[in-house]
Image (cartoon, coloured by chain):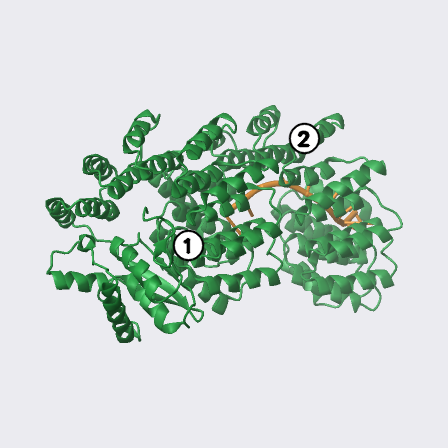
Chain colours: A green, B orange
Amino acid sequence: MAVELRRLFPSCATTLRRARALHALLLLSGRLVAYPSLTATLITLYSRLGDLPSSLLSFLHHRPSSSTTTIVSFNSLISAFVSHRRPSSALSAFHRLLSHPALRPDAFTFPVVLKACGDPQHGEKIHSLALKMGFCSNVYVGASLLHMYSRFGLLGCARKVFDEMPERDLGAWNALLSGFCQNSRAADAVGLFEEMVIERVGGDKVTFASIVPIIAFLEDQLLGALMHVRAVKLGLDSYLFVSNALIDMYAKLGCLGEARRVFDEMLHKDLVSWNSLISGYEQFGNVSLALELFHLMKEGDCQPDVLTLVSLASATAQCGDDRGGRSVHCYIMRRGWEMDDIIAGNAIVDMYSKMAKIEAARNAFDRMPVKDIISWNTLITCYSQNGLASEAIEVFDYMEKFEGLKTIQGTLAGILPAYSHLGALRQGMRIHGRSIRIGLESDVFVATCLIDMYAKCGKLGDASLLFQKIPRKSSGPWNAIIAGHGVHGDGEEALEIFSLMEIEGVKPDHVTFISLLSACSHAGLVDQGQKYFQLMQTSYGIQPIMKHYACIVDLLGRAGRLNDAYEFIKTMRVKPDSGVWGALLGACRIHGNVEMGLLSSEKLFEIDPENVGYYVLLSNMYAKVGKWEGVNKVRSMVRHRNLQKTPGWSSIEVNKKVNVFFTGNQTDPHPQLEEIQREIENLLAKMKALGYVPDYSFVLQDVEEDEKEHILASHSERLAIAFGIISTSPETPIQIYKNLRVCGDCHNATKYISIITEREIIVRDSNRFHHFKEGRCSCGDYW
DNA sequence: GTAGGGTTAG
C-alpha cells in the first residue's frame, strides 16, 4: 500500500497546493502513521516543490516513536535543508538523529551532512564519526569527503582520502579532479587527468566540464585543442555543460573564433553559454561584438543576469562610453542587483573607476549594503589608478583597522602603486614584508608592483634583485623593470633587458614597447628607439597605439629634431591626441622653438582646453626665450578661461613618515616650517656665493624681483629638500617626489645644494628621475 | 524510499 501511494505522489502532487491537500488527506485518514515511509516521500516532495512546511519542520521538535520515524525520513529532511541552503538546520537535524534512541545514521546520511559542514573542523569530526561507524568504504561517502576537504582548500587531506579508498568509481575521481580545478591547481588537475588515462578510467561529461575551463590558466592552446578532440571522440561535446566549458576555455585563451564555433554549433544554449562568450569578447577588447551579442541574447529567449551585466560594465568602461555606463548602472539598479549582489556592486565601482569618475565610484561603493575584500580592493585601486595616492592609503588603512578583512593579491596590487606614486619607500617595504608573510612575494602581479615600487622609490638595485628572484614567463615583470631603468635614464640597460626577454622567449606586449621607447627617449637613444618602433610592428605584429606615437614624438623632440617630430605626426594614420601634441610642446620648451610650440599648443587647447599643464608649458617656453608678452598672454588666457592651476606639492619620507609640502603658502603648515625656511635662507646665501643666479622666468606671477626670489624659495621641492637636510644625518641621500615637473630654477638650485651639502639628491617628478650628485644631474638638463 | 562528482564573475 505504501509503495503504491509513493508511486502515485509525483503524478498527483504537481503543485504545492495539491501536495498540501494530499498531505492533509493522509493525516486525516491516519495513513501517515500507518505507513511511516510516506513521511520521507512527503518531505522530498515538498522540498522539490520549493517549500518546507512548518508541520514537517516540527518533526524535529516532537518526539517521534521509533515505529513511525525512519532513518529515511531523517535523511530526506537533512537533504531538504541542505538544498534549501539551511546548513545549520541540517546539522541540528543530524544531531537530533544522533541522540535518537532507536535510530542511527546510515551510509546515506553522511554525504548530505558533509555538504552542510561550514568549517574544516566540523568536517573532520563528521569524517571520524563516519570512520568509526564504518561508512568510509562507501564510494558515495568517500566522494563526499573528497568534496568537503576540497571545499576548504585542503587538497592534501582530499588526496589522502582518495588514496585510502578501497574502491574508486568515476565519481570519486571526478570529486578529486574538481577539487583541484576549483582551487585553481591546474597542473595537479592535469596530472590527475593523466593518471585517469593511465588507469584507463574513461572520463565522462563531469570530468570534462571540470577540467576544460582550467586549461586556460595554463595558457596551453595545444592542450585545449587536445581536450576538445578527446571530448568529441567520446561524444561528450554535445552536453551543455561540456560545450559551455569549451566556450569558456577558448574565450579565456583568446581563441574567440573557436569559442564562437562551439557556441554556434550548440542546439541548446543557456545563460552560461552566452555569458562565457560575451565575457570573452569583452576581455579581449572586442567591445562591439560583446554588445552585439548582448542584444542578440535579449532578442532570443535568454534573459541577462548579473554576470552578463558585469561583462557589459567592463565593456562600456573600456570604450569610455559615459551614456553606456549610466545605462548599465540603471539596468542593474532597476533589477535591484545593486543592493542584492556584491559582484554587481563591485562591477559598478570598477566601471566608474576605469572611466575616471571617482565620485560616482565612491558613491556606488558607499551605497553597497555589504562589502567584501574585492569591494575594498576596487576602491583602493580606483584611487591609486586615478592618481589619488593619499586617498588610496587612507582607505587601505581604514580597511585594515576596522574591517578585519584578509589581505589578498588584489589588495597589495592596489595599494603598492599608491606608495610608489608618493615615493614612500618604507611603507612600500612594509607591504613587501607582508607579501612575504602571506606567501605572495612570488605572485607575478604583486611582484610586478613591488619591482615598480622599488624602481620608483629610487631603489633600482632592489628592483633588479627582486626581478631575478621571481618567475618571469609573462611580460609584466619585464615591463616593470624596463620602465624602471627608463625613468632612471639607463636606456642601455633597458635595451639589454629587452634582448634578454627575447632570448628567454617571453612575448612582449604593447606596454613593453611603451617602456622601451620611453627609456630610449630619456636616454637620447634616437636610432634605437626608431628601430624598435619598426620592430614592434614588423616582428611582433603590434599596431602602435597613441602612447607609442607620443613616445616617438618625445624621442625625436628631446633630441632637438623638432621638424622630424612634426613630420612624424603628419604621417600618423590616426588623429593625434593631447599626449602626442604635449610631447611636441614639451620638446619645444626645452629647445625654445616658439613657432612650433605655438602650433602644438593651439592643437592642445582645442583637444584639452581645461588642462592647465599645457598653459604652464607654453608660458615656460616663452619665458625661456625672454618673450614676456607671450607669458602675459598665456597668463590672461588662464585667468580668462577661469582655470585653476594644479597645486604643486612634494613629498619626502623621513622616519617612516611621509611629509607633504605645498608650493607657496602652507594651509596646514609643517611643524618645523620656520626651521626649514631658515635652512633655505642659509643655503641660498651659500649658493649665491658659488655663482647661483635665480631664474625668474619660472615665476609666473607678475610681482617685484625680491618677491620673485621668495616665491622660488617657497617651491614645494625646495621645502622638501631643506626638510630632508635638517632631519637626516649628513651624507644620507635625500629623495623627494614632486607631483608636477620639477621647476627649472629648482633644478638648477638643487645642483648647487648637492655641492654644498655633499649629498646625493634624488628628485622624482611626474616625468622621470633626477639624480643630483656633485653639481650634476643625470638628466643632462634635458627633462 | 534517501546519497557523491560538473560550466560563467567583480
Q: Residue at x 63, y 60 (%)?
A: A54
- Label 1: few (<14), some (14–19) or many (≥20) C-alpha neighbours in 10 Å: many
Q: Is residue A128 left or right of residue A323?
A: right
Q: Secondary structure beneath disc 1?
A: helix
Q: Nearer the viewer, residue A691 or A163?
A: A691
A353 lies above or below A655: above
The location of residue A205, given as percent across then percent down, is 72, 35
Q: Residue at x 58, y 40 (%)?
A: A500
The location of residue A490, given as percent across then percent down, is 45, 46
A202 lies above or below A306: above
Residue A666 visible, this orientation: no
Q: Residue at x 62, y 35 (%)?
A: A249
Please name the amino acid that badge 1 sits on.
Answer: Ser
The mark found on residue A384 in the picture is 1
The location of residue A757, given as percent across then percent down, is 35, 67
The mark found on residue A222 in the picture is 2
The location of residue A670, given as percent across then percent down, is 30, 72
Q: Secondary structure beneath disc 2?
A: helix
Please name the amino acid that badge 2 sits on.
Answer: Leu
Q: Earlier in the sequence, mark 2 or mark 1?
A: 2
Q: Nearer the viewer, residue A740 or A171?
A: A740
- Subunit bearing disc 2: A
A453 lies above or below A307: below
- Subunit bearing disc 1: A
Q: Is residue A714 left or right of residue A150?
A: left
For the residues labelled 2 and 1, the Cα–Cα distance comes to 38 Å
Quick check: marks 2 and 1 in contact, CB under 8 Å? no
